[in-house]
Amino acid sequence: MDFTFVEKIENDGICYKLLRSNFCKGYYIIIAQGKRDFSCGSVFGEKDEIASLFNEIATSYTPPFALRDILMDFEKQAV
């Protein structure tokens, strides 16, 4: 797997990371990791819209267990 690091934000003990896929154009990986919980998911979209989504997730202190549902809702709205 080949990814490029885009951004990292740490809020309230949770580390959020945004990675860009180098093998599937337009796909990004968002990771949320706390002391006891970890979640990650892929999402397809334009760079600016994914960066906005990532910042919204990180600045709203989204817990890792909620990340997958947020990404699924985002993909449903994009269709």
Image (tube, helix red, strand yellow):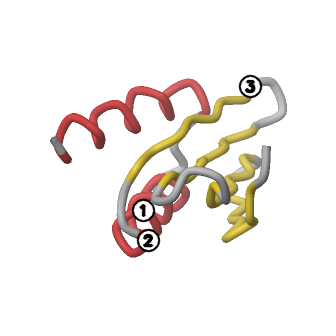
Residue 52 falls left or right of residue 13: left
In this view, 31 is above or below 10: above
* Rendered residue at 72%/65% (across/down): 8
Instruction: Tell me the crowding category of disc 1: few under 14, some 14 to 19, or many 20 or more residues within 10 angstroms, Cα based.
Output: many
Identify the residue position indicated by label 2 in the image: 47
Residue 11 in picture, x, y percent from top left: 67, 58
Real-space Cα separation, disc 2 to disc 3, in angstroms: 27 Å
* Rendered residue at 29%/39% (across/down): 75
Identify the residue position indicated by label 3 in the image: 37
Q: Nearer the viewer, residue 19 or 2?
A: 2
Which callout, 3 or 1, points at the residue further toward the start of the chain?
Answer: 3
Q: Nearer the viewer, residue 10 or 73?
A: 73
- The circle on residue 34 is none
Which image quarter is the N terminus in?
top right
Instruction: Tell me the crowding category of disc 2: few under 14, some 14 to 19, or many 20 or more residues within 10 angstroms, Cα based.
Output: few
- Judged from the image, the secondary structure of the residue bearing numbered disc 3 is loop
Instruction: Tell me the crowding category of disc 3: few under 14, some 14 to 19, or many 20 or more residues within 10 angstroms, Cα based.
Output: few
Residue 25 in picture, x, y percent from top left: 51, 58
In this view, 36 is above or below 2: above
Q: Nearer the viewer, residue 10 or 19?
A: 19
Label 2 near label 1: C-beta < 8 Å? Answer: yes
- Judged from the image, the secondary structure of the residue bearing numbered disc 1 is helix
Q: Closer to the camera: disc 2 or disc 3?
A: 2
Which image quarter is the C terminus in?
top left
- Tell me the amino acid under the disc marked 1: Ile
Identify the residue position indicated by label 1 in the image: 50
- Tell me the amino acid under the disc marked 2: Lys
Residue 78 in picture, x, y percent from top left: 20, 47
Label 3 near label 2: C-beta < 8 Å? Answer: no
Real-space Cα separation, disc 1 to disc 2, in angstroms: 5 Å
